[in-house]
Image (cartoon, rainbow, N blue to C red):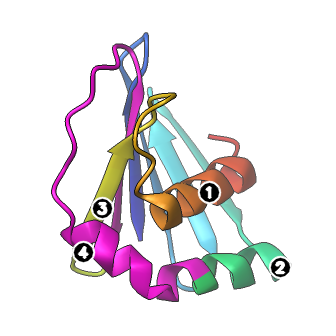
Amino acid sequence: MVLVRSGGFAGREETVTVEPDGSWTVEGAGSRRTGRIAGADLDRLRQLLADPRLSTEADAPATPTNCADAFEYRLTVGQRTTGYVDCPGEDGSARVTAAVVELLVRVTGS
């Protein structure tokens, strides 16, 4: 599984790669960090990735945004890619994707 976060005011990009065993790597801006998701967080991540709504979100058309300087998240799981722009007050239809992103940001410190 790969999560790419790009944009924001500084236009940065980070890539989070998570292996099936929970080990992760974050790369971006010339740095690299590693770690492991364990316990309840790994269980929750696996539940979210198995949620059928994630496939539905991947099949949904991209929604345009009016946000400037917002982060864009692209989540690839197997052959499916989903994502959203983190823009306050907008749609929020990618709820499972957003839950995966929130978990990964918290556990990796991204």
Classify 10 Å Cα crowding around label 2: few (below 14), some (14-19), many (20 and above): few
Q: Which mark is residue 19?
A: none
Cα distance, mark 2 to mark 4? Answer: 25 Å
Q: Which part of the image, by quadrant, shows the N terminus?
A: bottom left
In the rendered image, is residue 34 in sight? no
Cα distance, mark 4 to mark 3? Answer: 7 Å
Discs 2, 1 touching: Cβ within 8 Å: no
* Label located before the other in sequence (2 or 3): 2
Discs 4, 3 touching: Cβ within 8 Å: yes
- Write down the region rendered in magenta: 48-77
Left or right placement of residue 30 versus residue 39 in this view? left
- Front-most of 64 and 79? 64
The amino acid type found where label 4 is placed reads Arg
The amino acid type found where label 2 is placed reads Ala
**Residue at the disc numbered 2:** 40
In the rendered image, is residue 7 in sight? yes
Classify 10 Å Cα crowding around label 4: few (below 14), some (14-19), many (20 and above): some
Left or right placement of residue 74 versus residue 100 in this view? left
Q: Secondary structure at mark 3?
A: strand
Residue drawn at x 35%, y 17% as measured from the top left: 11
**Residue at the disc numbered 3:** 82
Classify 10 Å Cα crowding around label 3: few (below 14), some (14-19), many (20 and above): many
Q: Secondary structure at mark 2?
A: helix
**Residue at the disc numbered 1:** 104
* Label located before the other in sequence (4 or 1): 4
Q: Residue furthest left?
A: 61
Q: Secondary structure at mark 1?
A: helix
Q: Which mark is residue 80?
A: 4
- Magenta segment includes 81: no
